[in-house]
Image: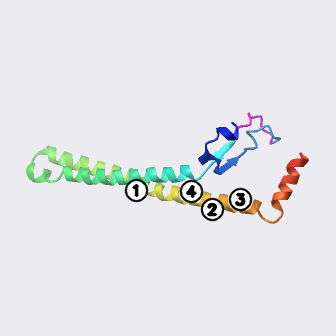
């Protein structure tokens, strides 16, 4: 893939894996590069946050749907069965809700750390004399 084919949002970081290229990394790959950016982390975090909110609504709606069942169906065996089913679904949906909430935070944190790491690496290469040393090395190859 040439630079012209890489979408602008993907140009934030362009990493060539040693095993993917023919640049002497020992691998026999076809020269494909691994492209990484902050965007997938923040996008995934947003999706997890939306799922958390959706599960929160689902648990509330499920509870409201069962309001009044015990008073209107007292003595029926089906009322006890419905109550047991409700508890099971509340537990399942609650577990999914908690997992989505955890993922939202964890993915957000990963995106922040990724961005901070990218900035630090970029700054280290732009530091005193590093760029010229890299350029000298590239020309020597």
* 2 and 1 marks in contact (CB < 8 Å): no
Upstream in sequence: badge 4 or badge 2: 4
Q: Quadrant of residue 121?
A: bottom right
Q: Residue 98 shows which numbered tag?
A: 1
Q: Which residue is mark 3?
A: 122
State the residue in front, 99 or 84.
Answer: 99
- Judged from the image, the secondary structure of the residue bearing numbered disc 1 is helix
Q: Which residue is mark 4?
A: 111
Looking at the rendered image, the disc whose residue lies closer to the viewer, 1 or 3, is: 3
The quarter in which the N terminus is drawn is: top right
Left or right placement of residue 90 versus residue 19 in this view: left
| Residue 35 lies in the magenta stretch | no
The residue depicted at 45 percent of the width and 53 percent of the height is 46
Upstream in sequence: badge 4 or badge 3: 4
Q: Quadrant of residue 17?
A: top right
Rendering coords of residue 49 (x, y %): 42, 54
Over which residues does the magenta segment extend? Answer: 25-32
Upstream in sequence: badge 2 or badge 1: 1
What whole-number distance in Å separates the C-alpha atoms at marks 2 and 1? Answer: 27 Å
Q: Main secondary structure of the magenta part?
A: loop
């Amino acid at each position: 893939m040439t630079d012209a084919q890489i979408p602008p949002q993907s140009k934030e970081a362009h990493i060539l894996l040693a095993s993917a290229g023919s640049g002497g990394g020992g691998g026999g790959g076809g020269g494909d590069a691994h492209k990484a950016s902050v965007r997938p982390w923040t996008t995934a975090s947003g999706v997890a946050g939306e799922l958390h909110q959706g599960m929160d609504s689902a648990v509330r709606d499920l509870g409201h749907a069962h309001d009044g069942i015990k008073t209107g169906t007292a003595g029926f065996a089906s009322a006890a069965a419905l109550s047991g089913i409700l508890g099971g679904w509340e537990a399942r949906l609650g577990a999914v809700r908690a997992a989505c909430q955890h993922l939202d935070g964890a993915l957000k944190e990963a995106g922040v750390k990724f961005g901070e790491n990218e900035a630090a690496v970029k700054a280290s290469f732009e530091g005193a004399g590093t760029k010229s040393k890299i350029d000298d090395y590239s020309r020597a190859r």
